[in-house]
Amino acid sequence: MSLPLPEQFTEYFSNHSKTDVKNLLITAESIFESETTNLNKAKKKVGQITGNLLTDPSSNYRRLTRFFNLPEKRKLVKSIMMIVCCMLDGKEKIKYLTLDGTSWHLGDKKIHLLTLSIVYGGVSIPIWWEELDKSGISNFSERKKVIREASKFLNLSGLTLLADREYIGREWFNYLRNKKIEFVIRLKKKIYQDEINEGCGDNKSEDICQNARYSKLEYMAKHHRYRRNGVSKQFKILGKIYTFVILKNPKENAKEELLYFISTLKDKREITKIYPIRWTIESCFKHLKSNGFRLEEINMKDSEKIMLMMGIVVFLYTLCVVEGIKQLKKSKPSDYKKYKDGKIFLTVSIFKKGLDHLNLRFRNLSSFIQFLRSELAGNKMLFLQNVQ
């Protein structure tokens, strides 16, 4: 099938032939239509997409698998991510980053994707990841690599990183500060207790929290007076000032009564208010792995191929999120559900709303290309950098 590719699309693939780019689109739409990363299942959609219905399924499967044998896969992933950034046209202000890992087993291999995302329109969208090929948590070098790679094409300065308890460490904190990335990170109980106790103020201070020791702060956090915003105290690690916050867990009958945070921000109200946004990356993983494109069904063990597959899935996921945000602006009262506690949530997620709408629009490669052409027209992410 000979179809002109969108110039806005191909300009970011200067290191790859038009045939490779077209095969990228065929592979991406095959995954979209079949809703799985298992190429043996996705092959069934290739004939419909290309218009060659008489092609043998085994030939379609070889076409898909050959695509993942291309050299310089990381350059291809970076080009894909430039397209993703172009689709995020700056209308939604970016304030937050989320960092987390997602993992599963493929036979005897442990797939572990350490993933950095931006929060766009209330949804986490991955901007870089590394396949760690190991069990256990990431180390400082691996996290630094993710930040470094993302920084090559996105300006992360001034954004606030939200992360869970395993993403701590003195070197890590200093690295983020040097990158001018603010952060709010949850802590385990008693982590940095000595530094927090040493950070006690003098008796002349009017701030009772600044004079309090760790145990006293815990006692205060349980009091109804501090239930909404918690208690906070400034302290130092390697000479740099941080804010320590303890908040009573708002969940009833929670296993952990208190929540602990460390941040470069100063206002405890802001810290406790924005941290729940971190949960958006968990929702993202759910959509990528089981509620959308079934990333866990991938049938490849090579780390570089997994990196590329993640890039394709993120590309499709972003298309759905952007479309979902557009559809949300046309929403009706029935699109929301109000719970007894007064909280209001969407009945269908932004991702699923976009996925359902795009399912009606994509029929073949031609319709897919036409959609991309219209989607990319004039779009340019405000903090887009040059790919290295």
Image (spheres, rainbow, N blue to C red):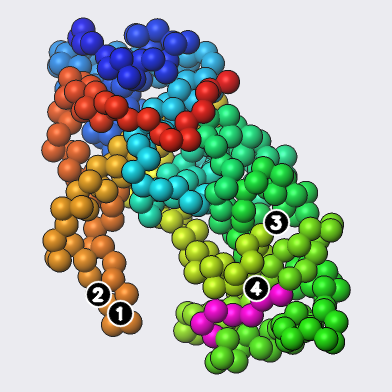
Vertical placement of residue 339 versus 39, above or below: below
Of the image marks 3 and 2, the number of the one nearer the N terminus: 3
Quadrant of the drawing holding the C terminus: top right
Q: Nearer the viewer, mark 4 or mark 3?
A: 4
Residue carrying label 3: 168
Residue occupying the point 79% across, 58% down: 240
Report the amino acid beneath label 3. Ile
Segment colored magenta: 227-233
Q: Residue at x 44, y 27 (%)?
A: 82
Residue 191 appears at what percent x and percent y?
75, 68
As measured in the structure, the alpha-carbon distance from the residue carrying label 3 to the one carrying label 1 is 34 Å
Name the residue: 83% across, 69% down: 195
Q: Which mark is residue 183?
A: none
> Is there a contact, CB below 8 Å, between mark 2 and mark 1?
yes
Q: Quadrant of the N terminus?
A: top left
Amino acid type assigned to the residue bearing label 4 in the image: Val
Residue 338's label in the rendered image is 2
User: How many residues crowd around disc 4 within 10 Å: few (fewer than 14), some, or many (20 or more)?
Assistant: many
Closer to the chain start, of discs 3 and 1, is 3
Do the residues bearing badges 4 and 3 touch, measured as CB atoms within 8 Å?
A: no
Q: Name the residue nearer the viewer: 167 or 107.
A: 167
Tag 2, which secondary structure? strand
- N-terminal of the two: label 4 or label 2? 4
Task: Answer with mark 1 or mark 4, whichever residue precedes in sequence.
Answer: 4
Tell me if residue 133 can be seen.
no
Q: Are marks 4 and 2 in contact (CB under 8 Å)?
A: no
Relative horizontal placement of residue 42, taking residue 227 as reference (left or right): left
Q: Which residue is mark 1?
A: 342
> Which sits in the foreground, 63 or 273?
273
Amino acid at circle 2: Lys
Residue 250 in sight: yes
